[in-house]
Structure formats: C-alpha cells, structure tokens
Amino acid sequence: MGGQVSVPDGVHVVVVGGGFGGIGAAQQLRSAGLSFTLLDQRDAFHHNVAALRASVQPGFARRTFIPYADTFGTSFVQGRVERVDPERQVVVLAGGREVQYSHLILCTGTDGPFPGKFTREASLQAAVQMYEDFIQQVQLADSVLVVGGGGTGVEMAAEIKTEYPDKKVTPGPVQQVQSSRVRLLISLHPPIHPSIFTSIHPSLHPSIRLSIHPSHVSVAVFVLPAASMAENGALKVNDHLQVQGFSNVFAVGDCADLPEPKLAYHAGLHASVAVTNIINSVSGKQLTTYQPGSVTMLLAMGRDDGVGQFNGFRLPRWLVALGKSRDLLLWKSWREMQQTQPQ
C-alpha cells in the first residue's frame, strides 16, 4: 500500500475479527501508520485453508495457528464482542470493556462447525489438541463417509485418502472432480458458505460420517438497522465496501454481501479496498471501488494434486499442486504475520 500517511488526530480504526480479512486490514493499517485495534475472541489466527489437512495429519495443526500478540502487540485485544453501538462509535466486549473507533472494519466471517473451522473461545494449545484428538478418531475408523460434493467435501475426501490410502472413503466426489478437471462442483454464489462437521458413530467397525452443512454469517451481535442486512444475514455494502447506512463502517470477507465465492483470497482484496478508503476518506480523496471479478478458485487434492482456475482460466494440475496443495498457502500467512513457521 505504500509508506505511512498523514491523517487527522482522532482517527482510530477498530477491526472486528482476526481472520484473513482482519489480519490483512490490520497489517495494512500498521504499514500506513494508522492507530488501530484488532479484536478477536481467540489468541491466534487460524489458517483454516489448511484445517482439513490438520484433521488427518498428526502434528500439522500447530502450523495452522499463528499468535496475534506476537505480531500486533498491544494493538491486539482478545475478547468476545458483545455489541457495536454505532451512535457512540464504540465496540463493547464481554465484561463491559469499550473500544472507541472513528472507523470500523467488520471481518466477522462465517461461523462453521469443527474441524473445517475453529471459532471457539480457546487457547492455541487447546485448539491444536482438539485437532490431534480428532485425528485419533480418524485413525481408528475403518471407513469414512463424506457427504457433500462441494469444494470442502472434495478436499476432505482427498486429504483422508492421501494420508490413509487404505482407508475406505466415499470415492464419488473425488472421481467426479478428477473426471471433470476444473468443473469445480461449487455454486459460484452460495447463500451460505459450507464447512465440515463430524458425527462419530461407535460400532464394532468404527466409522466417521463427515457431512457438509451450511454455516452462517457471524454478525448477529451488531446493533445495525435491518436495512443493512441481507436475507442471508450478510451485510449490504456499496461499491466502496461501506455498510449500507454508514460512511465509516466497512464489511470485509464472508460477512459482506457480494456476488462471489467466500474465499480467503477475496477477503484479502476487500481488506485492501477498505483500508484504502479509510485513508482516502480522512484525506479528502476519492474513494476506490471494488468489483467482483472472474472466478478464482483452487482445490487441493491432497498434497500432490489439485484443480483450479484463475480469473476464469483453467490452471494445470501441477501448478495448483505447487501453488496450493503442498503447503496450503501456510507460507503466505506466516509471512504476512511476520513470524517463523514451526517445522
């Protein structure tokens, strides 16, 4: 975004939610020299792009959690947001603490069940242990049934089959994706983003049933007019990503009602537009716009294969494997958080 900028006194940006959009916005605010506070109920960023592999590969989960405080210091506050008061321009945390803002960036994302997402109030160590415990359940199971052939279901089936090639896994979604190459089996504009939940069925021959269930946008805590909310619970935004009815409130990532897939890649693009527009608004400059582009989507088919497209163009499988599947873009998050990834 460039170097530090000169802004009027009293500008303080609060970023609610430390997902991909939240850490992207916080880093850009810090680079620009703006005062900000990042709020999240957890103590670590979860790189949930790699959550499915963390569900099957022992020792992998630790690499998917990155401590906030090590990156943002006192600009990070851990706490659960109870509500936002737009009239007083404060965010109220559980326990009553209030954080004042001049501008607000909502990056609350979508809430989904474990292990596809981890949205619980828990320490980094506790979160990692939950994944390790889940892996033991997978290892003990004779068979795994993956219900749902969207992107998450396909990646889950591929991860299990890669890590445990002899385990019985429902093959349908994987075969369908392989045969259709990059016909990605995902609705481009789903009303709600899918994620994974698990139901363990004890029996003589244990099995695990993994089902794709809808998640929901996590914005219910905010005191906003009904006119600002879309039917699916997301926040209506204009071309500048300002929430309808507010010039100083922006929505970024999954919680923004935009006609595009809910992806970490898009959340990063939104964050850049929101921060740029905050700077432009206090500097008297014209606001920039965000326009959803052509579909960009990559599906990891285990560690060594993948399918995808970029801006509408089909990508070679080897390129997707190199770009996403091997590391699931963990390097990018650790670099953005300016920390060293554990091995």
Image (cartoon, rainbow, N blue to C red):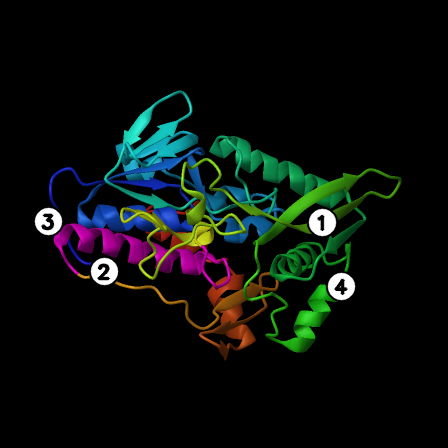
Question: What span is colored magenta in the figure?
Answer: 257-285
Name the mark nearer the viewer: 3 or 2: 2
Pair 4/1: label in front: 1
| Distance (Cα) linking label 3 and label 2 | 17 Å
Question: Left or right: where does residue 297 sit relative to residue 165?
Answer: left
Which of the labelled discs sits on residue 236, or is there none? none
- Tell me which amino acid carries mark 4: Pro
SS for callout 1? strand
Give the mark nearer the N terminus: 4 vs 1. Answer: 4
User: Within 10 Å of the Cα at label 2, are there few (<14), some (14-19), or many (20+) other Cα atoms?
Assistant: some
Location of residue 43 in the rendering, given as x and y in whole percent from the top left corner: 42, 33
Residue 16: image quadrant is top left
Which residue is identified by label 2? 287
Residue at numbered disc 1? 210
Of label 2 and label 1, which has the lower sequence position? Answer: 1
Residue type indicated by callout 2? Leu
The circle drawn on residue 171 is: 4
Give the dominant element type of the magenta stretch: helix, strand or loop. helix
Secondary structure beneath dot 2 equals loop
The residues tagged by marks 4 and 3 sit, at their Cα atoms, a distance apart of 57 Å
Q: Which residue is drawn at 62% across and 76% down?
A: 181
* Residue 56 visible to the viewer: no
In terms of sequence position, does the residue under pointer 3 or pointer 1 come before the other?
A: 3
Q: Percent from the top left, x then y, of residue 325?
A: 53, 62
- Alpha-carbon distance for marks 2 and 1? 44 Å
Q: In the image, what residue type sits under mark 1?
A: Leu
Select label 4 or label 3 by which is in front. 3
Q: How far apart are marks 4 and 1 (CA)?
A: 13 Å
- Magenta-drawn stretch contains 271: yes
Q: Position of residue 32 (x, y in %)?
A: 19, 50
Identified by mark 3, the residue type is: Ser
Callout 3 secondary element: loop
